[in-house]
Image: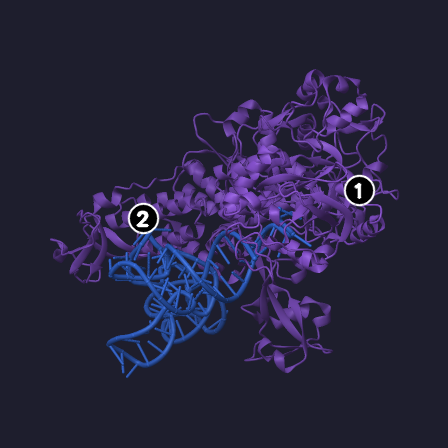
Chain colours: A purple, B blue
Amino acid sequence: MRIEEKWQKYWSQNNIYKTDIDKFKPKYYVLDMFPYPSGAGLHVGHPLGYIASDIYSRYKTLKGFNVLHPMGFDAFGLPAEQYAIETGQHPEITTEKNIKRYREQLDKLGFCYDWDREVRTCSPEYYKWTQWAFIRMFNSYYCNDAQQARPVSELIKVFETEGSSCINAACNEQCVFTANEWKAKSEKEQQEILMNYRIAYLADTMVNWCATLGTVLANDEVVNGLSVRGGFPVEQRKMRQWSLRVSAYAQRLLDGLDTIEWTESLKETQKNWIGRSEGAEIRFPLSGGDSLTVFTTRADTIFGVTFMVLAPESEYVAKVVTPEQKANVDAYIESTKKRTERERIADRRISGVFSGGYAVNPFSGEEVPVWISDYVLAGYGTGAIMAVPAHDSRDYAFAKHFGLPIIPIIEACDVSEESFDAKEGIIVNSGFLNGLTVPEGIRKAREYIRENNLGTVKVNYRLRDAIFSRQRYWGEPFPVYYKDGMPYNIPEELLPLVLPEVDKFLPTETGEPPLGRAKNWTYNSCPLELGTMPGFAGSSAYYLRYMDAHNTEALVSKEADEYWRNVDLYIGGTEHATGHLIYSRFWNKFLYDIGTALEHEPFKKLVNQGMIQGCSSFVYRIKGTNTFVSHGLKDRYDTSELHVDVNIVNNNILDTKRFKLWRPEYETAEFILEDNEYRCGSAVEKMSKSLYNVVNPDDIVVTYGADTLRLYEMFLGPIEQSKPWDTKGIDGVHRFLRKFWRLFHHGDEFFVSDEAATGEELKVLHKTIKKVQADIESFSFNTAVSAFMICVNELIDLKCNKRAVLEPLTVILSPFAPHIAEELWHLFGKTESVVKASFPGYDESFLVENSFEYPISFNGKTRFKMELPLDDSSGQIEEKVLANAQTQKFMDGRQPKKVIVVKGKIVNIVV
RNA sequence: GCGGAUAUGGCGUAAUUGGUAGCCGCGCUAGAUUUAGGAUCUAGUGCCGUAAGGCGUGUGGGUUCGAGUCCCCCUAUCCGCACCA
């Protein structure tokens, strides 16, 4: 379509979509999750969310809002680097190429992005601010009392004057010292202590190590013991790594969910991921004077404890193990180390070893044996548990396996076959807890713990700190150098610390990260950090940068920040639920604490667009031949199923001529047909090059135009639903656009009448405006498109070609089909873009004023109409014959006999 | 195992949120136009039945004058968490 190129050019040359702060207009910020520009380019699934956000942006603009709608690229990360390792090409070059291709594809779809604000996470001007935020995190600690980040300098002051005792801060390890002790410590010792508190900290932690990728990964990048990228095995290892203290923000991240408009399922996913559980930490004294601390949510079951279990990695192990048992314990720990996370999950056989030590139950005074087993996780709670086999299925299985006692403490429960895990019943065998219900027991036990100083009531979170370093090249360098083995940040005014050139992107033979190859990678002759930041670093605050993308003095100016504040509407996929969307919220909360972000939450409303899957086609080759048999006959032969390019299949019928040309080996192919056709099999799968089911938006644009593609993607179904792409239905919306076009034309001539519109015509217009407006507001874009189709059909029936109707229609269609709307708008003689027009608001009173008829039932069409009678009756169901009912008629000529009215509202009409 | 979501014609879906289920589109059938194909236009199209009529929103129950919609029991599919104490 020539029209589309013409207007795309016009929009860009006249800066139609350039956005500036305008204090006379309310702001609205619409954001897409920016893409990772891969080499494969966009397929028709990618733009689904972009189209929706574009429609909403254009709609909001028409409603008089000053809309910020930017776009950029998430360009650091593994795929570009893997490609660089394979081909030796610099990732910057391939990334640049991919971005260019993405941009071309996006431009063809007619989006209203303000490209002046484009950001790329891999450009030094941008990652300067990622590094800046890191330095701020490095120089902050989390104060639990104030529930916010505070400067480390304040912490130092307190240490100097009062020591550590009055500090309640999130940290790796509680250290206890006085002010004098602090002052007596060496610089290095002090730095080591401070490292315990920093929000960005370096520590020896258990990490997910992926040997194949040669890097550590965050928890959300590992699923079932395999890396998300590539599916390589991941093992647990203790390594010195940078981490972000996300866990300190767990409660705020949880509470914030109640203040934002996200889907319930997404909130639920984040709640699960944060995993809050209320319970108690209880100290069990050991014979040597030490004690074991365990976390439990079931303090009420403490009289049912018959043994304790430690995780093999637990630091308690060394304190408990007796000399006689040492050899056994060491052997067991060695054997568990060999098992990867994946093996542990796949093979849940029960294993464990007795440590030889005993702990004392602080409630009953009884001694219970301490065991070691890998069913207890080092990373959760304290890495040690009190085992209550009668009421926990895992403890039960362990007790049965090793013949340990099982003491039920709930009245009349049967634990001969399995444990009784439900939190209900009356407590028995439990001293002072006897006779209470489970919830009462929990409360009473916690009180007892507090009063007798046996431990603390505590809330535990599953959410772990985010491991923040990667042993890779293509990421942000850390603005950190090492002196005397301790890290220090380089001064902020020297940012950005630009990624150096290296000759190879693979880790060095000595296991050093690629940055180890860089020449002069030092600061004041001190070595700089060799790791780089993970993918989520650059995507965590990009929404703030768009507000003021070219600012060299600050991440965002006060003025821009105060005007745009946060994202009103964020559109993107659910796959980021436990990654980007957690990190970004955390990052925002940190920036809020230091005064850079002005809102508690970055994304007010979030809509998850569904995935568009591919619809794969199959052919069936008889084994050992080059003969292909049609789907219906395939069972008569021994065949193998092969993917075939969906572009040479129409309606499941294979284009055999094009098939022969598709690949050289099929040139001589022969076919066994049914009904003279070759029918293909089909299946819904992920859209992917390797499955030959990719549909390219460029092809659709060439055949049908961008407006048709936009309309069709919206028409396919509700935005949040996943659905397979099927090009078949696209003719329907294309036909609609042509019908719409023809309303304005006599032959090829643009012709609209200036006559006044009739009531009937206005009704069609206003009904459509009302429906479309309501549908856009509720993100029901598919029904909005239907409403346009109905409208056009009705106007054709009415033979309406009046300016008074068609002009507003052009405006309300423009968010969906901006090119056609723009063309028609100019044909109307307008000199400015349709973007400057305003959405014709629906006048509620219109129908009532203009007609004594009122639609009562409305299923796309008004089925019958009558005057609206209002009669109040006090909630009782009342059947009555309305005084004027007999005088009214339904559209089909029937007359109502009886009208049932409840609370003044017609609820039924009997004919 | 825990939690969440979904279920409507041959297909994608819709239903004023408790009021004539199936709007809109695809597909299909018939007709018109066209040298043909494509395109376009007209009519029809939930199922059974020639018809009158009957049956229909995954299954079974319930509330209601009235249920796709609300409540309870199943079933299936999808998603999240999962040895989290």
Q: Is A136 left or right of A17, judged from the image as shown?
A: right
**Three-letter amino acid code at the position of disc 1:** Ala
Camera-side residue of A366 and A155: A366
Q: Which-is-in-front pick, marks 2 and 1?
A: 1
The image position of residue A390, as x and y in percent, is 61, 55
| Mark 1 chain | A
Report how far apart the C-alphas of labels 2 and 1 lie in the structure: 77 Å
Q: Is residue A374 above or below residue A586?
A: below
Nearer to the camera, A369 or A884: A369
Q: Is residue A837 left or right of residue A566?
A: left
The answer to whether any part of residue A81 appears in the image is no
Instruction: Decide if residue A903 is in sight here.
Output: yes
Instruction: State the count of labels.
Output: 2
Closer to the N terminus: mark 2 or mark 1?
A: 1
Q: Compared to A813, does A157 lie above or below?
A: above
Chain ID, mark 2: A
* Residue placed under numbered mark 1 in the picture: A318
As drawn, A764 above or below B39: above
Q: Residue at x 69, y 37 (%)?
A: A122
- Tag 2 residue: A767
Identify the secondary structure beneath mark 1.
helix
Q: Residues within 10 Å of mark 2 (few under 14, many from 20)?
A: some
**Which amino acid lies under the numbered mark 2 shown in the image of this protein?**
Lys
Q: Position of residue A772 (x, y in %)?
A: 38, 47
